[in-house]
Image: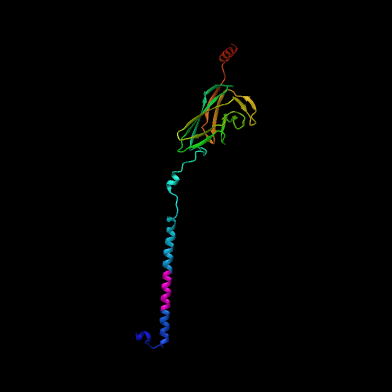
């Protein structure tokens, strides 16, 4: 104990006391620094774990939400097919077309004939004879809207007057015998083009029709 109170050595006692005080200060600084480091590490760990204890969205909550059936159908939801009825008609007559619609998606959607991307187009070669967008007053597709469930099938009947129009919906000529193509789209979903034929009536057939009309 005397060694602590009365330092032994060649230096004055005050020198040893200063050294002891400095050593204690250094130890205290090291202890405080270690305390701050440990506290910081523990705090960072708590912050990293905090989101796990907060409110989170359950996966079941998103998967269980029913899709909105009012959403517009897209090509992944429905398929369209068009068929000329019949596939060969007399030139100058009124050909008809049957459009078949099938919902091949996994959830309900809405398909409307009044939406953008609805069109009936007739062409022969590179010459376009008709587009329903040129003649908005034509009855055409009407105003039909379906809420389609997976597996649903619908059909629609369309006709063309058999006349050639310009973009102002003015008739510029009757159509003639030849090969024609019909294309249909509803609400931006398109069917593949289908070919049909127009033929002239033979003289015998024309005379028979005239005889029936006159009788």
Percent x, y of residue 163: 61, 25
User: Is residue 104 found left or right of 95 in the rendered image?
Assistant: left
In this view, which residue lies farthest toward the top?
215
Percent x, y of residue 31: 41, 73
Q: Is residue 104 above or below residue 11?
A: above
Percent x, y of residue 176: 59, 23
Q: Give whichever of 76, 69 is nearer the camera.
A: 69
| Magenta region includes residue 27 | yes
Residues drawn in magenta: 24-35
The quarter of the picture where the C terminus appears is top right
Percent x, y of residue 208: 56, 13
The quarter of the picture where the N terminus appears is bottom left
| Magenta region includes residue 62 | no
Q: Is residue 181 visible?
A: yes
Q: Is residue 40 above or below residue 19?
A: above
Q: Is residue 50 above or below residue 141?
A: below
The image quarter containing residue 185 is top right
- Taking the spot 43% from the left edge, 77% from the top edge, the residue there is 25
Q: Is residue 128 visible?
A: no
Q: Give whichever of 53, 17 is nearer the camera.
A: 53
Q: Is residue 7 above or below residue 212?
A: below
User: Is residue 114 found left or right of 43 in the rendered image?
Assistant: right
Q: What's the magenta bit mostly, secondary-structure-wise?
A: helix
- Taking the spot 49% from the left edge, 30% from the top edge, the residue there is 154
- Taking the spot 43% from the left edge, 71% from the top edge, the residue there is 33
Query: Looking at the image, how many numbered discs can be counted on the residues?
Result: 0
Visual colour scheme: rainbow
């Amino acid at each position: 104990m005397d060694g602590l109170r009365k330092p032994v050595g060649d230096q004055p006692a005050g020198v040893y006391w200063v050294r002891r005080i400095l050593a204690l200060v250094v130890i205290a600084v090291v202890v405080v620094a270690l305390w701050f480091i440990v506290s910081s590490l523990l705090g960072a760990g708590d912050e990293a774990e905090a989101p796990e204890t907060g409110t989170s969205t359950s996966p079941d909550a998103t998967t269980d939400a029913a899709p909105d059936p009012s959403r517009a159908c897209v090509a992944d939801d429905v398929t369209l097919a068009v068929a000329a009825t019949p596939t060969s008609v007399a030139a100058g007559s009124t050909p008809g077309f049957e459009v078949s619609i099938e919902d091949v998606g996994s959830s309900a959607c809405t398909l409307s004939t009044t939406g953008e991307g609805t069109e009936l187009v007739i062409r022969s070669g590179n010459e376009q004879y008709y587009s329903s967008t040129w003649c908005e007053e034509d009855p055409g597709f009407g105003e039909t809207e379906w809420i389609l469930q997976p597996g649903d099938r619908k059909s629609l009947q369309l006709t063309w007057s058999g006349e050639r129009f310009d973009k102002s919906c003015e008739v510029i000529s009757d159509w003639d015998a030849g090969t024609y193509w019909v294309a249909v789209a509803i609400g931006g979903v398109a069917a593949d083009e289908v070919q049909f034929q127009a033929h002239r009536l033979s003289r015998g057939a024309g005379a028979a029709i005239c005889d029936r009309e006159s009788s």
